[in-house]
Structure formats: C-alpha cells, structure tokens
Image: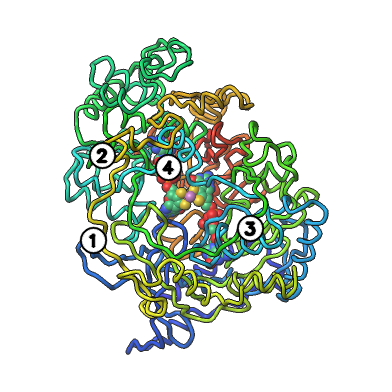
Amino acid sequence: MYEISRRRFLQWSGALGGGLASSAILPLPSIAEDVKTVPSSKKYDSIKWAGCTINCGSKCPVRVFVKGGKIDHIETDNTGGDEFGSHQVRACLRGRSNRYRVYNPNRLLYPLKRIGKRGEGKFARISWDEALETIATKMKEVKEKYGNEAIYLNYATGTTGAIMNRCTAGPWVRLLSLFGGYLNYYNSYSTAQITDGLNHFYGTSRGSDIMNIEYAKLVVMFGNNSVETRMSGGGTGYAYKCALERGGAKIIHIDPRYSDSLVGACDQWIPIVPGTDGALIAAMAHVMISEDLHDKEFLSKYCVGFSSDTLPEGTSENSSYEDYVMGRGEDKTEKTPAWAENITKISAQTIINLAREVATTKPCFIAQGWGAQRQSNGEQAARAIATLAAMTGNIGSVGTNPGTREHTTGWIEPASLPYKNPIKDAIPCFLWTDAIVRGKEMRDITDGVRKTTQLKQNIKFLWNTGGNCLINQHSDANKTAKILEDESLCEFIVDVNVTRTSSNRFADIILPDATPLEQEDFVRSSAGYSNDRPYIIYSQKAIEPLGESMPIYDMCTKLAEKLGGETLKNAFTEGRTQVEWLEHLWDVKFKDKEGIPTFTQMKEMGILKLPRYKKPLVGFEKFVQDPIANPLKTPTGKIEIFSTALDKMAKTWILHEGQAITPLPIFTEAKDGPLDPARKTYPLQIFGYHYKGRTHSSFWESAPIREINPDELWINPVDAKERHIKTGDKVLVYNQYGTMSIVAKVTPKIMPGVTSCPQGGWYKTENGIDVGGCINSLTTHEPSAIAKGNPQHSILVEIKKA
Ligand SMILES: Nc1nc2c(c(=O)[nH]1)N[C@H]1C(S)=C(S)[C@@H](COP(=O)(O)OP(=O)(O)OC[C@H]3O[C@@H](n4cnc5c(=O)[nH]c(N)nc54)[C@H](O)[C@@H]3O)O[C@H]1N2
Ligand SMILES: Nc1nc2c(c(=O)[nH]1)N[C@H]1C(S)=C(S)[C@@H](COP(=O)(O)OP(=O)(O)OC[C@H]3O[C@@H](n4cnc5c(=O)[nH]c(N)nc54)[C@H](O)[C@@H]3O)O[C@H]1N2
Ligand SMILES: [Mo]
C-alpha cells in the first residue's frame, strides 16, 4: 500500500521537472525503507513538539515521532479534551504531513549556483563557502555602485517562528540593516486593500472577536471562508463553527462560490458577481433609506458623511453617501435593487429581503474575509461592507462585528530579533517588479511610495527567502519571468528555501534552509487566527538538518563574517546562538511574569496554552460608549463614511486610466472587473481561492496531499454547456496575460459567468502554456488605485476545451 503512494510520489515530483543539472540531483531518502523498519512495538527514540509553521495562520502544534534519527510519523496535539475552550489544538492533514516536506525528492540539501541562463533552471552544487563568498562580493559591489537602496528583500510568508525565516523582524532584516540597509516594503499580499480602506474608514481594520457570533441573531459573511482558510484546531474556523452551534444564529454567506464554510452551516447562500459588493451595499442602503429602516441616530452620532448634515465643512453639495444612493450625486443614478441586480446578478427581491432582514435583526455580526478586497476596487468593497454595519448600528455592542474581518484575542509571542533599517524609503510590496524596471521614476503620488517622494534606485539585488512571490504568487508570471530573466535589470537574485520551487528557477544562488523540524524556535499562531485558546509552541528540533541544509540564523552569521569580518559577525550575533537568542527574547517579554513559565521550563514543556479571555472583545465598544473621550484614529475621530483623507488624495494623486479614488465607498468599475470592456473578448470571470490542499504554493510538493486535493477549475453547467466542457476535461484558460491548462469540474457550486480554481499551483510553462495550473499566469501587475495592492482576484478570461 505504501509502496504505491511512494511510487506516485516520485512520478509526480518528476513531473515538476525544473531542469536540475545532473550534478545537483538530490539523493532520495528512503521513506519506504523507513516505513518497513517501524517496529510494531512502537518504540521511538524521541517524541518532540514542533509547530506547523506554514502560513495558513493557524500554526498548529504537532508531535514528531523520531526513530533511528528519522521522522517516523507526526501526530497532533494530545493535551486537553474535546470541549471548546480547553480543546486539543488538532492539526489538519497538511500539518500531519510535514514529514513529506522534510523527506521530499526536491528537498534542497546543498547550496546551488546557476549554470545556465537565468530562468532556465540549470544549477550545480557548490560549497557553502563559495555560495556565501559569491553573495558577499555581489552585495558589496551593488552597495558600492548603487547604494543600499538597490537591495530588496521580497515579501514572503513561507514559514514564521521567532527567529526562523521571516521577511520581517528576522535574521535577514537584522543582517541587511547592519550592512547599511535595504529598500522597505509596506502592505501585504493578504490584506492591502482592506487594511488601507478600513484605516480610512475606522482608523483600524480590527473588529470584534469571532466568539461574538454566539450572541448574534444573524451572521452575514462576505467572501469569508474561515472553515477552509483558518481550518484545524488552531484556527478561527473551529471557533466559528462552535460559536454558531452554541448561539444558533441564522447565517447568510455572500460569495460567488459555495465554499467549504457553507457546507453544513449556512441558511442562505447569495452568490454575487466578484468585485460588486459595493453595488449590493448601495442598493441595500436604497431599500433602507426608502423604507426608513436605517439607524439614523447611530449615523449622526458616530459617522461622517452618510447624509449631508454630517458632511465635513467645505465639501460640495450632494456629496454624501445618501446623495449617491438616491441619485442626487454626480452620476445622477439611483442605486435601486434593480440597478444592483444588473451588476451583482442578485435578484432585486433578494436584495430587498436582505436589506430588511439586516436592518431589523439585532445584534447582527457582519464580517468579510479577504476575498472581496483582493479585487481591483477592493478598497471600495471593504469600506462599503463596513458601511452596512454603520447603517444598521451593528457596531460596538455584544454580538456585532463592524463589517471587518472577525478578530480573535488570543495571541502570545516572545519579543522579536531587534533591527533598525537606516533606510526608510518604502514601496507597496506588490510593486517590486515595477521597482526593478522603473524604480527611479516611482513617486509617492503615482505609486504610493512612502517616507520619500521618489525612489533613489531601481532594485538591483533581490533576496527571496521563504517565499514563492518571486514568480508563483506574484501577478503576471509570464511578464515577471521576462523581467527576472533580464540580468541587466536585477543583477543578482538569491533564493532561500527548503525545496526546489517555481521561484528558485530564477535565482543565481539557492541556499538550503533547515526545516522547522530541524531547529529550535518559538512558533505561535498569527494575530487574528488563534481561536480562543492562546498557545505558544517551543519547537524542539526533532532531527539533524538533512544534507548540508542549515538554519537561516547560522547562514546569516557566516554571511555577516564574509561581509564585514568579526566586527559585523559580532554585531549580528551579540555573542548568542539561536537558542541563546530564544532565551533572551523570551525573557525580554516574560521574565518573572505570573503564570508564564521560565524559558527552561518552556523549552522542556514544548507547548503552553493559556486560558481564554473572559469576555470576547467587541470592536469599537469604547468609542460607541463615549465617542468624545475615545475618538477613532481617523482625521475626524469618527467613522468616516466620507473619508476626508481620500478626498484629498483624489485631488492630488496621479492615477492610471480607469482608476478612481473616491471619498465615498461607492461602487467603482475597475480593471479586469465584470464591467471592463475587455469582457467582450474575455467573457468569464475567474479567481483563485485559498485551498485546503495547500497554503498558497506550499504543500504542493507533498504528493499524498496533492492526491487528495486535486486542482480543478469550477465552472457552472451553463457556461460549461456553451463550451462543450464536461467534468474531467482538460481546458485552456486564457487572456491577454497568458494561458493556463487545468482540469474542469462542472458544478453549480459556482455561479454562472464566474469560474474559480485553487491558487498556488506551481507555474511551469510548456510552449508558452502554463501547465502547472498557476492562476498568476492570468493576473495583472496593475495595482489597485488607493493601496497599490494586488488585485489578484480580478481576472477576465475565456475558456475552451484543450
Ligand atoms: N492569484 C493569487 N495570488 C496570490 C494570492 C491569491 O489569492 N491569488 N494570495 C496572495 C497571498 S494572500 C499571499 S500571503 C501570498 C503568499 O505567497 P508566499 O509567501 O510566496 O507563500 P507560498 O507560496 O506558500 O511560498 C512559501 C515558500 O516558503 C517555503 N518554505 C516553507 N518552509 C520553509 C522553511 O522552513 N524555510 C524556508 N526558507 N522556506 C520555507 C515554501 O517551500 C514555499 O516555497 O500569495 C499571494 N498570491
Ligand atoms: N488552507 C489554507 N488556508 C489559508 C491559506 C491557504 O492558502 N490555504 N492562506 C492564508 C493566507 S496567507 C491568507 S491571506 C488567507 C486568505 O484568506 P481569504 O483572502 O479570505 O481567502 P480567499 O479564498 O482568497 O477568499 C475568501 C472567499 O472570498 C470569496 N470571494 C472572492 N471574491 C469575492 C468578491 O468579490 N466578493 C465576495 N463577497 N466574495 C469573494 C471566495 O470565493 C472565497 O470563498 O488565508 C490563510 N489561510
Ligand atoms: Mo496572505
């Protein structure tokens, strides 16, 4: 039985290709042999705690069973019971499969250098000394010729611990800071539009704790798939299910897709055309205003700009949200349910019913995931959904959520590795390819460059560590590949990973990192993910690093010496090893704190769980109790339905054709959205959702996980019939940016006109076609207007049978 999956494992990893030069083919650890040697008596050398560090956010604890220096298998948390609040934090299948990531045919075991053209994928094994010497020489050269502003550390989320690889607050930023600095980024690929949008609206994007659902009468979710994207015992998905069960609230999901979160727990699914949530909200406002259902008292006391009486001074006539909705605004169009039906494809009657229900059912927990905001008009959608909470007064009281993503309160972590980058200039993380090509042209009012009005340099030296955004997870993979292949643009690329990926094909040097199971570190769930049971894991190094792989902290220590001798090395380490830093960072925050173990105890225990907070956090509770004493961090201190800052930006920023910045959260048409004229050529919408089978592109390399989570394109029977497509057919999905091949699944779980597939398939081209099912062969480099974020869910395509 095992032999079979082992064979398929090898077959599939062969399919990855990647063109390793024969000298770099990695010896395969014998997993089958390993399994044969497991004694039935189940005696193990050791059982160690570790964390699944891959960034789904949940970061579950796992127990690693070691036999003969090898990982035998992995089990989940066994502390606590079944009752929510004292429950076992059980990892999902991905967490339990981490062994496959360690013993992977494509695991990086030695440093590699490029021997072909950049991007061709030919590499040869070299020594650590040669690798680090080459990198140090090139870094010094770039610094001398272009200055430190030409060095960039790409956004990456592959693994996070206290010290392990992190593109923020880890060894890399510390070393690069000591070397004279690097170009910063701000934003994330996760939440650029919602964070920026809601900062203008509330001064923060943080809402209520998920447990408020228990006290809600109605729950309305916009593009929020917590069961799949915060799955497992460590994630919010479990809390969500438990809170629903306990409270018994009615639940409505607004999502173009019947996502896993709807399965088993959804009273009403309202499919919506992607990118049109702003239109739905405007029409709901129309119903409420027409039927006098909106909470006027709340709007006038706490908000700016819903109606003309709360507009800031100096704003022109008819510029309130109410004016926009009732057709008195610039476009002179009433946002009736019929108007919205045309755009959202939600029937006018459904919109009317929904508006009445939300307006009259309190408390209502209104939340959005990050799907609606990862659109080209995502800032508008995010703000519009928050407006719904304001219109209905569902803010600041128990059982409500203010239209933000739900929050969780449980979160503990030690201090992080200190660093101070002498360079302040920052780009939006999505615009790094622009900064390679035309960095010196990039300005604050054109590209959202911060802390300076214009960049000093183009990016010339690129670090990509623990990420696949170098190609796979960034947009327009075909265009990105061309930019990276041109060595006159970015002169040097270093990739640090545990496995060969689609990204490190484009590196000049690849460095092999140790996995989290091969080093010691703290692992904690990401903020806003851990459910009600805050915990922290001390990952207790289960096995020695395979091959010549080594923890990043050790790589950085060696590189520091190459870059600046003993002086830089000592400045970097301050005389500490990784474990000594862990102790220091723990003590900085927790020494002598009541109820918190000492470092030595923690190291021994492996996992620490703290009791839940007594009362779930209610977003904006204090503000609602007393808005004068507790103003928001917006310019007016109130909820800005009319944003005074965006009003200024709209007048000063230079935008691309078709982009708009509007002070009100109105529905705007945007690039690659459903109303883009390009739709005549590319009539279907598509977007890549975050999949249970992977975290982005991570775990794709685990064949057993891949087997049970196939990559499929969901297409509605109506669209499939028109194109003579049946389930199981191989189809070509194409637009002006590229072509992707994938297998179709005909299903009513996706609405007509819209298609979807999991994001994160590994980019691999054959004759110009991406055969890896990487949705980013179809996305654009054009950012959203306000946040300059990644609109990776806004895609128009046509599809045909291959
Ligand atoms: N079209 C589209 N594109 C998207 C998205 C989308 O929804 N649609 N989502 C976006 C979002 S929200 C995000 S956060 C990004 C995520 O993009 P990335 O941050 O690039 O995430 P991954 O693709 O998981 O890549 C993580 C890499 O880290 C590596 N890794 C894992 N463990 C270790 C380790 O211990 N050490 C080292 N050195 N490396 C390790 C993995 O092998 C993998 O190659 O993608 C974005 N891209
Ligand atoms: N299993 C798993 N978990 C993960 C990840 C993963 O890759 N796999 N990635 C992690 C990371 S880094 C992040 S950032 C989060 C991502 O979490 P999210 O960004 O919330 O996840 P998505 O799947 O992109 O989108 C959520 C839902 O929004 C819907 N949607 C898309 N467009 C629209 C729209 O215009 N309007 C509405 N109303 N709905 C829309 C989608 O169908 C989907 O069901 O997940 C994290 N957790
Ligand atoms: Mo993300």
Crowd around label 4: few <14 · some 14–19 · many ≥20 (10 Å) = many
- Report the mark closest to the observer, 2 or 3: 2
Crowd around label 2: few <14 · some 14–19 · many ≥20 (10 Å) = many
Q: Is mark 2 within 8 Å of ligand 2?
A: no
- Report the mark closest to the observer, 4 or 1: 1
The label number, if any, that marks residue 464 in the structure image = 3
Mark 2 vs 1, N-terminal side: 1
Mark 2 vs 3, N-terminal side: 2
Mark 4 vs 2, N-terminal side: 4
- Report the mark closest to the observer, 1 or 3: 1
Q: Is residue 735 visible?
A: yes
Task: List x then y, in percent, for residue 782.
Answer: 61, 35
Q: In the rendered structure, which amino acid carries the disc numbered 2? A: Thr
Q: In the rendered structure, which amino acid carries the disc numbered 4? A: Trp
Describe the element under mark 4 as helix, strand or loop: loop
Q: In the rendered structure, which amino acid carries the disc numbered 1? A: Gly
Describe the element under mark 1 as helix, strand or loop: loop
Q: Which residue is mark 1?
A: 85
Crowd around label 1: few <14 · some 14–19 · many ≥20 (10 Å) = some
Q: Quadrant of the N terminus?
A: bottom left
Task: List x then y, in percent, for residue 745.
Answer: 42, 45
Distance between the alpha carbons at the discs numbered 4 and 1: 26 Å
Do the numbered discs 1 and 3 sit on residues whose CB atoms are within 8 Å? no
Q: Is mark 4 within 8 Å of ligand 2?
A: yes
- Report the mark closest to the observer, 4 or 2: 2
Q: Which residue is mark 4?
A: 370
